[in-house]
Amino acid sequence: MLEQLISQDSQKFNLLVVDNNSTDESLLYLKTWSNFFGDRITLVSNSINLGAHGSMRNNLDLIQTEWFAQIHQDDFYFSNHIHVLSQEIENSTPEIVAISTLMGSMTENGKRIGSPPRAAMFISDHDQPSALVQNLRTHCVPDPASAFRVNTYKSTLSQWHSTSFPDTEQILKFCAHGIFKYVPKETMLYRENPQSQSHSINKSESILGTYIALTRFFHSHEFISIFNLVENQKKTIFLDSIFNAIEFRLPNRTLFQLLKISILESLLNITEYSDGVVLSYSAETFSSLGFIFPSNLLLNLSKLHETHPLGKPSITRVRELLDFLEPQVKANPNHKKSLLSSIHQNFGHLIPLKLRVRLWRFFIGRRLAPGAMSQFNFKPMCQSENKDVECE
């Protein structure tokens, strides 16, 4: 990591280095870094291991700049990484709250491999409600390749005692504060490590942790502020897309239904039973659960307000991603790699980035193979006056 930092094209950065209560000689080694960075480096040591998010929160007050970027010790950064982010920061407008570059991939042992398609290859900067749906379905703002506005980061911090969903929960809150900038340049390699903190938790903890985090978010002022940004004629589309995304993220049907009811209850309270779309959606949901009285009451209330038919369009334009595009995720660990998977993993990184993006678009757009492992959205909220935006 020291060599990567020294070799950065731009050295216009301060360095905050945190030793997370290491038990080896790491702290002694880190103290030698002052020989290279002088007074630009601040070294701190946590009294206990706080985990990645806890360590960040515990030391965030030491960052004095308007923007910051995280450099993860187990990833590899190209020499242009800080320069690219710095240029984008200098040219950013006030509404931009996060800037992300593309991540390549390497194995746990450091061998470069073909990376799965990243969201930044397909999406553009667009409105906040669409960004919420997009990141709710698939996390699109990777911490290792991103720079964040410090004040926004501080104001959106949530729990840090669990490694289940904390980064996505925070990014969902970010959507209420501004827009994201995606830079189509590969500036780092992400280490595909199945033993990392976020990947090593069991399935039950992951699902329940996701449910708890989503419950917190959908009862936050950030979600309400985003909901208020949605035009009345698009609220049905928005809610449809929200619940479709949650169902994708939360495979447990019972927890999904509980969360859906909880969200609608919150919206009924916030809108004071005056929003026709929320009333209609709630009436239909309660009816599907067999709740006769609340269903009829809400339906009658909805008739007093302007309503829009519940359709099945989506804010997002979603395409299935092929399972061989994400070789690090396997439903069955004993499943043999396909020929395409092997070719991609071993030689995909040799394909120039622009050509790689075109190939992803070709494969994904035509759904050439079954077995989706992830989904992205490619388009913002439907706007009929914009011919460049397609809606399903």
Image (cartoon, grey):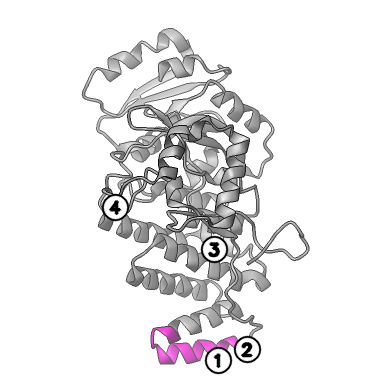
Specify the amino acid type for callout 4: Asn
* In this picture, residue 186 sits left or right of residue 94: left
Specify the amino acid type for callout 1: Asn
Residue placed most toward the observer, 262 or 113: 113
How much space separates mark 4 and mark 2, taking CA atoms?
Answer: 52 Å
Instruction: Name the residue at 45% across, 58% down.
Output: 370
Camera-nearest label, 4 or 3: 4
Q: What element carries label 2?
A: loop
* In this picture, residue 274 sits left or right of residue 52: right
Residue indicated by mark 2:
304
Residue placed most toward the observer, 186 or 276: 186
Number of residues whose C-alpha sits closer than 10 Å to that of mark 2, classed few (under 14), some (14–19) or many (20 or more):
few
Residue indicated by mark 4:
332
Can you tell which mark lies on residue 224? 3
Residue indicated by mark 1:
300
Instruction: Check whether the beta carbons of the residues at disc 1 and disc 3 lie within 8 A of each other.
Output: no
Disc 4 or 3, which lies upstream in sequence? Answer: 3
User: Where, quadrant-wise, is the C terminus in this rendering?
Assistant: bottom right
What span is colored magenta in the figure?
Answer: 287-303
Number of residues whose C-alpha sits closer than 10 Å to that of mark 3, classed few (under 14), some (14–19) or many (20 or more):
some
Instruction: Check whether the beta carbons of the residues at disc 4 and disc 3 lie within 8 A of each other.
Output: no
Camera-nearest label, 4 or 2: 4
Instruction: Name the residue at 65% across, 45% down.
Output: 95
- Residue 102 at x, y percent in the picture: 54, 36
Instruction: Check whether the beta carbons of the residues at disc 2 and disc 3 lie within 8 A of each other.
Output: no
Q: In this view, does 349 lie above or below 41?
A: below
Main secondary structure found in the magenta portion:
helix
Q: Can residue 157 be seen in this view?
A: no
